[in-house]
Image (cartoon, rainbow, N blue to C red):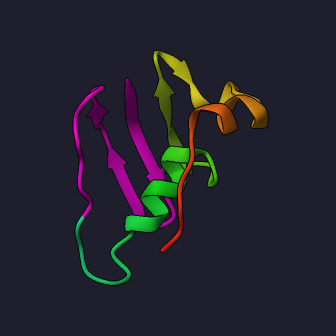
Amino acid sequence: MLHTENLCGPQLGPFNWTFEPGTLTMLQGPNGSGKSTFLNLLSGVLKPVSGAVFWSGRDLSTFSFFERARLISSIAQ
């Protein structure tokens, strides 16, 4: 399970969301609304200004680069 607590990024947030296994989530919004920034925060590419992202109860910031790489992948548009 992926969970955010008071996640804030550059000009975004705070977000408190839980993404349950087996569900599909869609991000929709106009250009420049922060969709890519939010995904970069979720994946650990960007460090949050405040708050945290948790993967199965563990703070994503405590994962090594290689641990994150085994769990998270993305394709830029």
Judge from the rendering whether residue 1 lies leftward or rightward of residue 37; answer left or right.
left
Compared to residue 56, the image places residue 12 above or below, namely below
Please name the residue shown 53% across and 62% down the image. Answer: 75
Residues 76 and 35: in front is 76
| Image x and y of residue 23, in percent | 22, 35
| Numbered circles on residues, count | 0
* The magenta stretch spans residue 22: yes
Residue 43 on image: x %, y % = 55, 46
Residue at the image position 58 percent from the left and 32 percent from the top:
71
In the displayed structure, does residue 52 sit left or right of residue 6?
A: right
Identify the magenta region: 1-27
Outermost residue toward the top?
Answer: 57
At x 52% / y 51%, what residue is drawn?
A: 41
- Measured from the top left, where is residue 51 in percent x and y? 48, 38
For this rendering, which residue is in front, 74 or 36?
74
Query: Which residue sits furthest bottom?
Result: 31
Res 19 quadrant in image: top left
Q: Relative to residue 66, is residue 7 drawn left or right?
A: left
**11 sits to left or right of 24:** right
Residue at the location (55% across, 18% down)? 58
Image quadrant in which the N terminus is located = top left
Q: Hey, which quadrant is residue 22 in on the image?
A: top left
Q: Is residue 69 above or below residue 63?
A: below
